[in-house]
């Protein structure tokens, strides 16, 4: 199935470049481009793309506000939005995640990471650039020290291990290799974590792990948990 993408950036050169990169992929097509957040919201509501790729700094309505309008907690049918920006600032990432973004990349991330983020968002997953994941999520937890969430049900030992790996920004394949379990088992544990933690995606799982103080050194793979593989 082709992933339909909407791009919003106030710089025409950037919009064109992103469009060329994504349109070159066999499973992705760009269905619209917007030069500001207001236009992006209007086009997104009209075109209903599978994924929106938004810049942060745009005239009138910025990318974070556009994200909130299309994917925020109060939106009944939230869209999948990836934020892409030149600015590696913690406050931008916090705001984007709170607004409902499913990905956060810097514009120098490269073609592979950009396309991976779009595909992940289309699949209901989330991706943050690896070079900023750990630092930003740790800062996120420090920004809200009073919040110590608890799971709806206790986590198994294996779920705790997967939780920590997700919070470190690892992909499903990397988690499977690290913990010596299958990819389908990883996906099953992540689905269970979403249910127990009330998380909508792996970004929210990672945030929960940091806010709950679970980011202690990971146990060695397979130790004391063979029955849960």
Image (tube, rainbow, N blue to C red):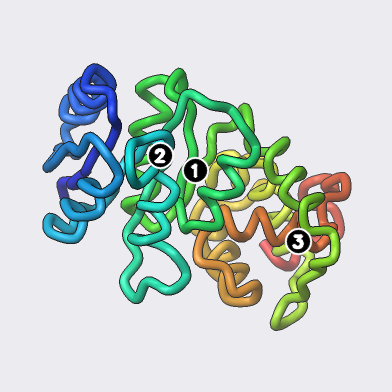
Is 197 positioned to the left or the right of 24 in the image? right
**Residue highlighted by disc 2:** 117
Between tags 3 and 1, which lies in front? Answer: 1
Residue furthest to the front in view is 60
- The residues bearing labels 3 and 2 have C-alpha atoms spaced at a distance of 25 Å
Residue count near mark 3 (Cα–Cα under 10 Å), binned few <14, some 14–19, many ≥20: some
**Residue highlighted by disc 3:** 160
**Residue highlighted by disc 1:** 127
Q: Decide which of 152, 189 is in the foreground and name it.
A: 152
Query: In the structure shown, which secondary structural element does the residue marked by tag 2 occupy?
Result: helix
Residue furthest to the bottom in view is 152
Residue at 51 percent across and 51 percent down: it is 183
Residue at 21 percent across and 22 percent down: it is 12
Which of marks 2 and 3 precedes in the sequence?
Answer: 2
Q: Position of residue 99 (x, y in %)?
A: 49, 57
Query: In the structure shown, which secondary structural element does the residue marked by tag 3 occupy?
Result: helix
Q: Position of residue 207 (x, y in %)?
A: 67, 56
Residue count near mark 2 (Cα–Cα under 10 Å), binned few <14, some 14–19, many ≥20: many
Q: Position of residue 158 (x, y in %)?
A: 73, 62
CB atoms of marks 2 and 1 within 8 Å:
yes
Q: Position of residue 62 (x, y in %)?
A: 39, 43
Residue at 81 percent across and 50 percent down: it is 142
């Amino acid at each position: 199935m082709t992933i339909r993408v909407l791009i919003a950036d106030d710089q025409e050169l950037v919009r064109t470049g992103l469009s060329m990169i994504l349109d070159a992929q066999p499973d992705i097509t760009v269905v619209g481009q917007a030069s500001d957040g207001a236009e992006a919201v209007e086009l997104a509501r009209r075109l209903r793309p599978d994924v929106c790729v938004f810049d942060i700094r745009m005239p009138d309505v910025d990318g974070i506000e556009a994200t909130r309008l299309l994917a925020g907690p109060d939106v009944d049918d939230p869209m999948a939005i990836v934020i892409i920006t030149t600015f590696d600032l913690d406050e931008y990432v916090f705001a984007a995640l709170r607004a409902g973004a499913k990905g956060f990349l810097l514009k120098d991330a490269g073609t592979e990471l950009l396309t991976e983020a779009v595909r992940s968002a289309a699949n209901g997953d989330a991706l943050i650039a690896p070079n900023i994941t750990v630092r930003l999520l740790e800062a996120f937890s420090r920004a809200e020290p009073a919040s110590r969430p608890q799971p709806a049900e206790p986590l198994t030992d294996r779920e705790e291990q997967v939780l920590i790996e997700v919070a470190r920004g690892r992909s499903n394949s990397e988690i499977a290799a690290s913990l010596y379990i299958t990819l389908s088992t990883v996906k099953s544990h992540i689905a269970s974590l979403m249910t127990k933690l009330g998380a909508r995606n792996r970004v929210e799982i990672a945030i929960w792990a940091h806010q709950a103080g679970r980011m202690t050194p990971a146990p060695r793979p397979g130790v004391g948990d063979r029955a849960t593989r």
